[in-house]
Image (cartoon, helix red, strand yellow):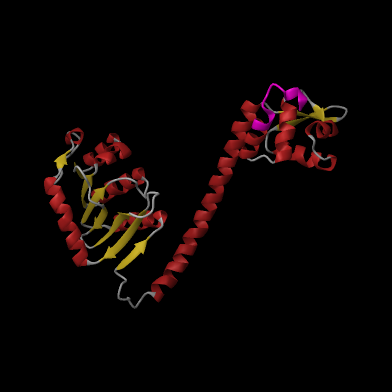
Amino acid sequence: MEDLAAMDFQFFWRRLQQLGLNAYEARSYLVLVGHPRFKALELAARAHVPRQKIYEVLDSLVEKGFARVIQDKTKLFTAVEPGLAIPAYLARKRQQAEHYLLEQARMAAGLVDDLTAAYSESQQGRGTLDYLHIVGEPAQSAALYERMLREARTEYLEFSRPPYAADPVESGKLVKEARARGVVCRLLADPSMLDTMGMDRLKECSAAGVQIRQVALVPLKLALFDGVRGLIALLDPVITKQSWTSLFFDHPGLGEAMKGLFEEHWRRSQPIPELEGAASGTAP
């Protein structure tokens, strides 16, 4: 390791561990990087790896693509060039993660179906407040929003302002799909939304027939589906760190009140000049 005096050894040692190598592997690879080749026990002494562990460490480095074996009279080990080893290692990790997530998604799909059936059976008798419930977890709010948007049949209204629980790109895709089903879609945008979503995405929505206008200040985050169901996201006024809590409702009276609030702001809204050329025959 003395031969690596020109490098900040501790810095690179920690960075390699952050990538996924263990401490022995990272130290051994750095020693190999500074030398053309080593016998296993020579490397153990240089890298301060216990002799009984060095073969396990080298086998792992070879498997992960950081070292290779040179067959001579005795087995020698050399480092794989960092520019090849590290990108290839990260690519394999990404593939493994994607495979793992795919398997988890397949398992989860079956689990959702089974548990949904059990949940539906247990919810046959509606409680007094089944039409209202609070959703505090952003990912759950996003999933609920996306599900209701897919199920919308006649109208979708939105007070839109960041931050967004759902991915803006995915949301834009779902809004365009709703419009293709014949759903009337109107979005009232807070000025900050124009920067968050990007004008190109807004033009795509406008070209699909989504009506988008802007107001100086959106009063709250609202998504209203078919005038009955919706989500209201409220900023927590107490917590210092910005936090949103969503209120789900399935109530005609509340839906009518929220639609009235939307229509009042829609009347006071202004067109977005950059989108006027993109609109294609939207309803007034």
**Picture residue at 33% right of the left edge, 55% below the top:** 145
The answer to whether residue 210 is above or below residue 137 is: above
Residue 261 in the figure: left or right of residue 147: left
Most extreme residue toward the bottom is 125
Q: Residue furthest top?
A: 6
Measured from the top left, where is residue 213 in percent x and y?
A: 18, 42
Query: Does residue 217 appear to the left or right of 172 in the view shown?
Result: left
Q: Nearer the viewer, residue 229 or 214?
A: 214
Q: Is residue 284 visible?
A: no
The vertical placement of 58 against 34, above or below, is: below
Residue 128 lies in quadrant: bottom left
The part of the chain drawn in magenta is 1-11
How far across and down, in percent of the image, does residue 173 sit? 32, 45
Q: How many marks?
A: 0
Instruction: Report whether residue 196 is seen.
Output: yes
The image quadrant that residue 63 belongs to is: top right
> Would residue 244 appear left or right of 8 to someone viewing this image?
left
Horizontal and vertical percent for residue 232? 28, 57
Which corner quadrant holds the N terminus? top right
Quarter of the figure with residue 22:
top right
What residue appears at the point 12 percent right and 46 percent down from the top-left corner? 268
Q: Vertical placement of 175 versus 70: above or below? A: below
Q: Is residue 218 magenta?
A: no
* Residue 249 percent location from the top left of the image: 28, 64
Furthest-right residue in view? 73
